[in-house]
Image (cartoon, rainbow, N blue to C red):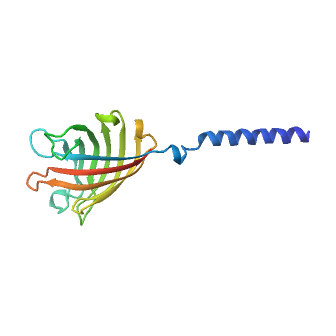
Amino acid sequence: GLLDRKSMASAALFFVLLALATMLPQTASSEKETHLKVYWHDVVSGPNPTSVPVARAATTNTSKTAFGVVMVIDNPLTEGGSLNSSRLMGRAQGTYIAAGKDQLALLMLMNFVFTAGEYNGSSVAIMGRNAVFTEVREMAVVGGTGVFRWARGYAQARTHTLDLKTGDATVEYKVFVMH
């Protein structure tokens, strides 16, 4: 009777607690913090762009901020600021959308996919607002794969070079990742 129900209830509670304990995330002591610095090259001009428009609103062309344009990117990520003479570390793949009506502000949705160095085969997912003409823009690291599994953190973007004639830009990204 009663004793059996009590022992069954305590056994059930024990197994629920055991299941919860095994589902807890890594302890803080097993987490690492990694700092990355790469240069993101947005090539919109020339015969081989790495950033292409795939959608636009009816008012995009008359907007001072290109509001409504959606770009798909597969941008090179390099170790240094020069696209042609710096080591290729990976690709930034995803989209950015001109989401600011009164200020040029982009919604960035991209994966930094590493193809060289110690993070080869791993990626970091970045999402956030990029007010292009602000000196430092901060976006969230919302996940990752490989060595960056369970990643969270932030990325800081600073314009390295911007060619107003072509629209091509090189942006320094400092990425701070807990994983």
Quarter-of-image position of residue 8: top right
Q: Which residue is drawn at 14% across and 39% down?
A: 85
Q: Where is residue 93 in the image (x, y as percent from the top left)?
A: 28, 41
Q: In this view, does 150 lie to the left or right of 131?
A: right
Left or right: 25, with 127 as reference point: right
Left or right placement of residue 51 versus residue 146 in this view: left
Q: In which quarter of the image is residue 77?
A: top left
Extreme-right residue of the structure: 1
Q: Which residue lies furthest to the bottom in this view?
A: 102
Residue 119: image location, x then y, percent: 34, 36
Residue drawn at (90%, 40%) of the image: 3
Q: Which residue is drawn at 85% across and 42% down?
A: 6
Location of the N terminus (image quadrant): top right
Q: In the displayed structure, would residue 107 be above or below residue 102? A: above
Image location of residue 84, percent across then percent down: 13, 40
Q: Is residue 74 left or right of residue 14?
A: left
Quadrant housing the C terminus: top left
How many marks the image carries: the answer is 0
Q: Where does residue 33 sit, x and y in percent of width and height?
A: 42, 47
Instruction: In this rendered view, identify the residue nearer to me: 21 or 51.
Output: 21
Q: Which residue is drawn at 17% across and 40% down?
A: 86
